[in-house]
Structures are given as structure tokens and as C-alpha cells.
Image (cartoon, rainbow, N blue to C red):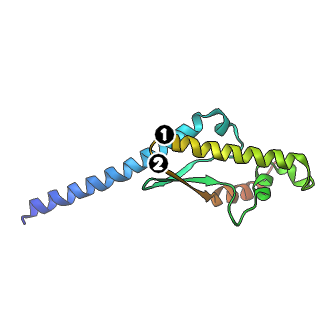
Amino acid sequence: MSDRKQFITVMVVAALFVGWIGWRGFEVTHLNAQLKEDRVVAGYPYQHRVLRVEGDTAVISSLRSHSVSTQKALTAVFPGMRHLADTHRDWQKAERELAQVQARAGDLVLGTGRVNRIRWELDENWYHLQSMKTRYDTTF
């Protein structure tokens, strides 16, 4: 094979790869725009977002996981609840609201027809940023 043919082959493969990566980025951007356009999802203090698309599965950020309880997630979003008793009705209301917003975010992403499944992933970066914000808060 001549040098020119090899060069063209490599360039075509590279262009396809860059196009594929760009398309994946476009997909994520489009899905996140859908979430931002929804009044309920966008109005919640924590912003669920699509982190990436893997095949037909959208990976969406979440505050809860097997290792992080709903109560810990809610105290991160609503620090004032930290002082409420576990049985206080505001806990139940906040749990329901978080579950409804997360379910709505998943339904919106599925409703676009671009993906068939949702996988939730703990947003460790958000917790880290909240920790830093609390640690270095300079308000007097």
C-alpha cells in the first residue's frame, strides 16, 4: 500500500473516531438541555445531569446510592434539616420530593427516544464541592 493510501486510511479512521466522540458529546449536551428546560427538574436545588451515554444507557448523576443514604443526601441539599428529628414530617416530604424529581429526570431522558435505559451514578464530585464550599465558606 502506498504512503498516500495509508495516510488517507488513517485520516478517515481518525475522522470517524472524532465524529463519534463529538456525537456522544452532542447527545449528552442535548439530554442535559432537556433536563434544564423542565421546570420541576431545573427548579430543584440539586441539578441531575447526564454524565455520559454508554450504548443505549444514559448515566445520570444522583445524590443517593447504596453507600449514601437518602438522609445524608437531603442534609447536603438542605443543611437546615440536619437539626430535625428523624421522624419529622419534613423528612418524609423531602424524601418524596427527591424521589419524584429523580424519577422525572429519568423519564425525561427516556422520553427523548435517544436511550432505552437509565443508570444512576453517585455524584461524588458534587459532594466534594459541597464539602469544600462548607470548609472554605468565608461569609461572616
Residue 43 location, quadrant: top right
User: Around disc 2, counting alpha carbons within 10 Å, would you say few (fewer than 14), some (14 to 19), or many (20 or more)?
Assistant: some
Q: Residue at the spot x=70%, y=44% of the render?
A: 100
Numbered disc 1: secondary structure: loop
Q: Nearer the viewer, residue 98 or 107?
A: 107
Q: Is residue 132 left or right of residue 105?
A: right
Q: Which residue is mark 1?
A: 112
Label 2–label 1 contact, CB within 8 A? yes
Numbered disc 2: secondary structure: loop
Q: Residue at the spot x=74%, y=59% of the render?
A: 131
Which amino acid type corresponds to the residue marked 1 in the rendered image? Thr
User: Around disc 1, counting alpha carbons within 10 Å, would you say few (fewer than 14), some (14 to 19), or many (20 or more)?
Assistant: few
Which amino acid type corresponds to the residue marked 2 in the rendered image? Val
| Label ID, residue 115 | 2
Q: Is residue 47 visible?
A: no
Q: Is residue 30 left or right of residue 19?
A: right
Q: Residue at the spot x=65%, y=33% of the render?
A: 39
